[in-house]
Structures are given as structure tokens and as C-alpha cells.
Amino acid sequence: MSLNKHPDFLIIGAGIVGLTIALELKKQFTDSSITIIEKEERPGEHASGRNSGVLHAGFYYTADSLKAKLCRDGNLAWQEYCKERALTVNHCGKLVVARNEVELKGLDELYKRSQINSVELKKITAEEALEIEPNVYTFDRALWSPTTATVNPVEVIESVLKDIKEAGITLLNNTTYLRRVGGKIITSNGEFESAYVINAAGLYADKIAKDYGFSKDYKILPFKGIYLYANDQKEGMGLKLKTNIYPVPDLRNPFLGVHFTVTAENKTKIGPTAIPAFWRENYAGFEKFNMKEMIDILGIDASLLLANNFGFRKLAINEMMKYSKRKLVQLAGSLVREINQDGFVHWGKPGIRAQLINIKTKELEMDFKYEGDETSFHVLNAVSPAFTCAIPFSEYLVKKIKEKINS
Ligand SMILES: Cc1cc2nc3c(=O)[nH]c(=O)nc-3n(C[C@H](O)[C@H](O)[C@H](O)COP(=O)(O)OP(=O)(O)OC[C@H]3O[C@@H](n4cnc5c(N)ncnc54)[C@H](O)[C@@H]3O)c2cc1C
């Protein structure tokens, strides 16, 4: 079959956001032709296949945010989707703990947000927390989120890819968007023309948006999330937790602090961190090294260090220290009663967060962002919990796209 070089919709990026937008577009515009271009050999090679797989409940976010509007519904939507398709879901819940008296205020704030966002969250005593997880440490009380669950993000992506195929959507792997020349989209796989372009390119979304005259005030700053797995081979060495354990986060930034995740397969891991990365796909060593990106990113980092608006100096120093296994285990250790330093042995596959920064205000964007017009649409800050939110987020974005097309 010959390649359609003139699809009605062309989506750049086959992460969870690009894929779910494609499915929603097909529902809304049944007769349309949709092509997704993906630069890698297969979808899900970046954030969507490298995340914690936590279906967040939705209590972290301020009521005015899109994250608050979409997270609870996204959690429910994936749980239903996984049930229908018999995909693995670990209904392990989450404990949020306080390490000292000062952090109790943080628990209260999260509880308040849960009530406003209509998310189920329970205030529990330290004794009740111990009944849920006998190794947890909390000062006086904790919060229990029964609806937090974990999935295997790679398994979910595989399933969504089957839906894409069934819906008759074209997915072109090994096809990199290079630039735009007038109405033409130049890729590594030839030229395309499309009535409507949707940019869901994760770490490169800001760059592509600039070709279309958007993302003027923004740049993406990459933050690396590394994981350290508990040794479950040797009895008594590692740590086997029953539930996710998170600290009270610093609500001035979008990261959740060092925590324990229990994976869909019931493995315990520490992380992810939010270590400033030096280039966008700076996963390990000099892999995918990009000098131009590094110079640009170091420049932004320097301006953030100077401004120190959201405590970036402390954040950067603290995060850099987390490259040390010892330090990471020590930090996570404050959430439990007992931990064996030697019980955490292997690093997991790291992920990189495509965090948007407003270059004028020097603040990190806390909420999802999008910009667009009647010919193109750009998803600019699809950071956590965008995986959780993906289904209702895509419904929301396609509504916005329809409004733009009809405007
Ligand atoms: C460490 C980590 C942990 C996380 N944990 C969670 C969690 O537990 N729960 C949760 O809800 N969220 C979590 N998130 C967030 C979640 O993973 C992301 O919000 C989500 O995956 C973003 O999806 P995306 O499709 O926008 O981006 P991506 O998955 O990055 O997809 C973008 C795609 O665009 C492609 N692309 C880029 N440039 C081009 C180009 N020029 N041409 C063609 N294709 C291009 C890329 O190859 C990529 O496949 C986490 C993120 C990280 C990094």
C-alpha cells in the first residue's frame, strides 16, 4: 500500500499522549486519515515507556489546574481499560507519610486538595499506617490513598498500539520531524502535507512548536529520574513493601520527592529522582550527547540558580547527590523503620521528564500547557501525571483542537 503523504491529521510523537490523541481524533472524525510519525524504532522509548507506572489518584494538584480536573478520571479510565483488556494492575494504594512535626502541615494541605478535587484520601494514625505496611515510618499520622495503583507502562503502550492498528491509524516509526517549510513537513522519511498538525513530541515539543510560531515564552528543561531496585533474589536482603510510600513533597516544584514504588509486578524500587540533565536524552553516559543542547541547558540552569525562584539551588544540589546509591537509600530510609543499605543493588531504566520552564518568569510550569491555532496544535508540558491523565487529557485536547479548527 502506498504511503499517504497528505493525511488529514499528522501527529508528531508516539508517546502515550500522541497515541491517545490519535484514538480520540478517530472517534470524533471517523472518516479522517490520521498518521503518527515517531522518530524511534518503536513507540514508548521515552517518558511513556520509562515511567513509574503509577496511576496517581489526583490529590497533589491545586483545584484550578488541568491536572486536578483530569487525574481522578484518568486513574479510573486506565483501571477500566486494563480490566477490559486483562492487563496487569497492582491495586496497592499509597501511603503519604510525615517525617517530622513540620511535615504534618503538608499532609493537611494534601488532604485539603483531595477534598476539593473529590479524590478519596483517608487521614490515618501511625498505628493504622502500620497495619497497611508494617515497615512504614510516619510521624504521628499519615494519608492513605486506596485508589493509587500501578500498571506496567510498556504493557499499556503495547495494548494501545493494537487499538491504533484496529482503528486504521497509520504509525510510521523511524520517521523524524526535521522542519517545516511553509505547509510542508520535512521528515527523515520524506515530505508530508497535512490540514492539521499535532505536536506531541515530549522532550522536543517546544522546538517543534517554535517552527509554528508557538512556545515563545517556554523551553523544555530535562530532569532525569533514576530508579534503584530492591534485591528480591536473596531472602532478607532487599525490601518488599506492600504499598507505595511517598513523603510530603515540596509543593513549590512539581516533583514528589524520593519515594518507594511498588511496581505492577510487585517489585519495590526507590525513585524516580529529578536530577537536572545536561541534554534532552541524557539517559546514561554520553549516549545521544548533544553539545548545542548542553550549552543551552547549562545557560538556563545558570539563570535558574541565580534567580532561585522555586528553591532551584537546593533542588539541584540535593538531586545531584542522588546519583549515589548510598545517599538514595539513606533518603528513602527515612520513610521506613528498617532498610538494608546493601539490599538495593541494581539501577532501573531511567526516564527523563520534559519539564517546561517559563524563560521570562524563570518558573517551572506546574500544569499541562498547550498552544495552537486553526492549522497546528502543540502539547507543551505533558509531565507527570500525564500518563495517568492520558485518556481524559486527550478527550480534552481534541475538544480544544475542534474549537481551533472551527474558529
Ligand atoms: C521518570 C518518570 C516517571 C514518571 N512517572 C509517572 C507516573 O508514575 N505516573 C504518571 O502518570 N506519569 C508519570 N510520568 C510522566 C509520564 O511518563 C509522561 O507525562 C508521559 O509519558 C508523557 O507522554 P508524551 O507522549 O507526552 O511523551 P513521550 O513519551 O516522551 O513521547 C514523545 C514521543 O515523541 C517522539 N519524538 C520526539 N521528537 C520527535 C521528532 N522530531 N520526530 C518524531 N518523533 C519525535 C519521541 O521519540 C517520543 O516517542 C513519569 C515521567 C518520568 C520521566
Image (cartoon, rainbow, N blue to C red):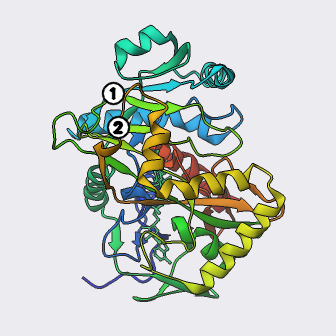
Give the x, y percent position of residue 291: 58, 86
Instruction: For mark 1, give the secondary structure.
Output: loop
Q: Can residue 215 be seen in this snapshot?
A: no
For ligand 1, tell me if the residue under mark 2 lies within 8 Å: yes
Q: Residue at x 31, y 59 (%)?
A: 164
Give the x, y percent position of residue 224: 51, 60
Give the residue type that dot 2 points to.
Thr
Q: Eyeballing the image, is 355 above or below 388?
A: below
Q: Name the residue under label 2.
A: 150
Q: Name the residue under label 1.
A: 92
**Left of 176 or right of it: where is 70?**
right
Q: Can residue 118 be seen in this snapshot?
A: yes
Which corner quadrant holds the C terminus? bottom right
Give the residue type that dot 1 points to.
Cys
What is the number of the mark on residue 191?
none
Image quadrant in which you'd find residue 75: top left
Q: Which of marks 1 and 2 is nearer the N terminus?
A: 1
